[in-house]
Amino acid sequence: MNTKATEQTVKTVILADDDTAIRTVLTQSLTRAGYEVRATGNAMTMWRMVAEGEGDIVITDVVLPDENAFEILPRIKKARPNLPVIVMSAKNTIMTAITATERGAYEYLPKPFDLKEMLSVVEKGLEQAARGEKSTTAQPKSEFEEELPLVGRSPAMQDIYRIIARMTQTDLTVMITGESGTGKELVARALHDYSKRKNSPFVAVNMAAIPRELIESELFGHEKGAFTGAAARYAGRFEQAQGGTLFLDEIGDMPMEAQTRLLRVLQEGEFSSVGGSKPRKTDVRVIAATHRDLRQLIKQGTFREDLYFRLNVVPLRLPPLRERIADIDDLVRSFLQNCEKNGLPAKTFTSQAIERLKEHKWPGNVRELENLVQRLVAIHPDEEINLAAIEDEFSAQNETLPLQLNEQVHDLSDAVEKYLTHYFAQFGNDNPPDGLYNRIIQQVEIPLISAALAAENGNQIKAAKLLGINRNTLRTRIRDLQLTLVRKNNIT
């Protein structure tokens, strides 16, 4: 007998599931692990056992023949607050995870589940009960009345759902990382919309979209006359988000001065507006996001390490679409429904078209897939979008690949990164041609030198100074790159 499953007496597991095969497999596994199992196929028997004081932990499916387990959970938590309840469900959506947490479940596991994980969760649940801890129960929203903010049933997304469900019950700072187009703002909104702050503002601000010299004013506000052009007092984003959630997107683009002020807010819970002298108390949950490697920025000296640790209390990595290909069916179905809601004609994708979508690399992630679905619905004449339509779309993209950088670009490094992502995606399993380094350097160097020469009206001395290189080096590069100069008669 497994000693972990026993203390002084054998622990009893109440198991409720109307699927005989699942009951059999779980009963055998739990028995081998040293637990006593009381199994049933209905909610009434489960509730009777709980009400009579039986069992040390409950495992239940959500959908039972006579009653939904989510309706029973509040009664269980009221009758026996310390009894851990593990919820299983084949309806693997974010709302399932959130509803399970709101109703007071100890843990939610999607079907099909891993038996080792189930045994581990049972063991931890019993340890929590032994410590006298209990789950909090919030007023839930009906799963069937909500529009799902996130879509996907893959294992990668199930992990995301469970973290989001736990974090909606706290005010912990969350750092969301992931490639562009993975849905970072959707996750931030879900964390807000299903939290106790849901009736207060959700304010989103993109650090990369604001001029660096205005970021402090934008975040913390300014007083009238604080600087030239400040004709009136401005309430910054922290003040606008009071009592709610402030989502700081692309946090890696925040200048150091603003980072210092943000760190003070997180440490002290107060801030001062630009030009103001009186600190203001703030009650705001901060959620940050970035597609950049903040640890690398710390090494480069452009991001504060102490701020990183303040923001990265709960790290949440969103997987790129290539790691959740199984979700493409659900995503396409969701995007088609959204298109129809927005007045576009109702259409479907053939199974061959869906399979072709699963073969694509998706460098632009979910955003790229959504754009493609919207475009095909809008321009494709037939009610059914077939394989040929998908192939035509991908062929058109490959022909104009260098121009397919429609995502927002934050800086030169970001632009190059996006270009290279698209560049490698076109080759699939084939090897790209050699010599990429020199080609990229040349593609950056030509517009850089041309722009410097144009800015200085063709004067190489001034252009070399602007670039920070030697005049002879500039002349050599002009010759090697065969650049056409702006005004040759002015070259000195």
Image (spheres, rainbow, N blue to C red):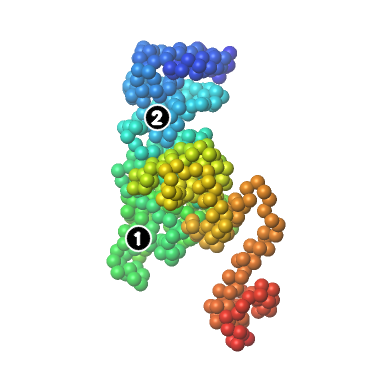
Badge 1: how crowded within 10 Å, few (<14), some, or many (20+)?
A: many
Q: Mark 2 falls on what kind of element?
A: helix
What residue do we see at 37% from left, 46% from top? 345
Task: Say which of 324 and 395 sits in front.
Answer: 395
- Disc assigned to residue 446: none
**In x, y percent, where is residue 325?**
54, 39
What's the residue type where badge 1 is placed? Answer: Gly
Find disc 2 in the rendering and name its residue.
100
Task: Say which of 289 and 381 sits in front.
Answer: 381
What residue do we see at 51% from left, 26% from top? 112
Counting the numbered discs, the total is 2
For the C terminus, the quadrant is bottom right
What residue do we see at 57% from left, 42% from top? 359
Find disc 1 in the rendering and name its residue.
221
Instruction: Note whether 8 is above or below 270 in the view shown.
Output: above
Residue 106, quarter of the rendered image: top left
Closer to viewer: mark 1 or mark 2: 2
Residue situated furthest right in the rendering = 434
Question: Is any atom of residue 101 visible in this view?
Answer: no
